[in-house]
Amino acid sequence: MFEQLLELVKSQSGEAIVNNPAVPNEHNEAVMNEATNSITSTLQGLLSSGGSNGIAQVLNMFSNQNAGADVNNHPVAQTMSSNLVSSLMSKFGIGGQQAGGIASMLLPMVLNKLIGGSSNTGGGLNIQSLFNGLSGGKTGGMDIGSLVAQFGGNALDKNHDGHVDLQDLMAAFTGGGAQQQQQQQQQPTAQTGGGILDALTGLLGKS
């Protein structure tokens, strides 16, 4: 997953890094690696130890409503940017203004390739494969795209309509099989968004 994301970063780094006089040519590859690290480490931190709010923020950022320049204003993107700026300044001696310019130019382009589960990012990288990589494969059987759609607009899914994807998700969290799923179907579907998020927190937080 990291290599796929790195290739995506490289494909978007022309103006921000390669043709940027603030970045010496011998540091181009290292700066691209650092940008990739800032994305993965920020997401991993929020998903594994950010609690329910952290997971909700990540899912919300990847909703289609944040496509375009507005992604720069999202709290998750701002955290990524801050992390990248700090790294560029401390590791490569790049000035704060120049580092900020690199982050503000590069990160939105990369994130916009991922937002909405785009299948055109190259190398098969999309939202599903990104989450699978960050979770060590534990989200492989889950429809991450559906979860992202639910968290668009800063709102949880409140209609509890009993779609199979959500029931499968809860079964994966609890380790339940067909019998447990049948029992859940016979009970009122009063699962809350917080319950789903807490379960996802536990799943992604395990080593």
Image (spheres, helix red, strand yellow):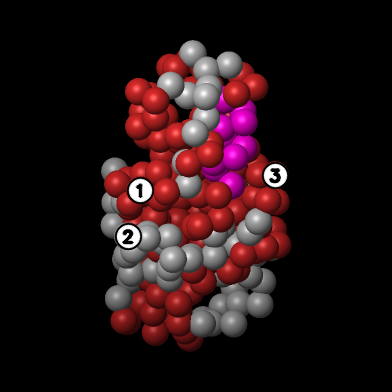
Magenta segment includes 107 = yes
SS at mark 2?
loop
Instruction: Identify the mark nearer the N-term, 1 or 3.
Output: 1
Residue at image location 39% in from the left, 84% down from the top: 182
Residue at image location 57% in from the left, 25% down from the top: 99
Q: Indicate which label's residue lies in the foreground, 1 or 3.
A: 1
Q: Position of residue 7 (x, y in %)?
A: 35, 48
Picture disc at residue 51? none
Picture disc at residue 123? 2
Amino acid type, callout 1: Glu
The CA span between labels 3 and 2 is: 28 Å
The boundaries of the magenta stretch are 99-108
The CA span between labels 1 and 3 is: 25 Å
Q: Is residue 183 left or right of residue 85?
A: left
Residue contact at pointers 3 and 2, CB within 8 angstroms: no
Instruction: Identify the mark nearer the N-term, 3 or 2.
Output: 3
Picture disc at residue 7? 1
Amino acid type, callout 3: Asn
Residue at image location 49% in from the left, 13% down from the top: 93
Q: Which residue is mark 3?
A: 73
Q: Is residue 20 above or below residue 144?
A: above
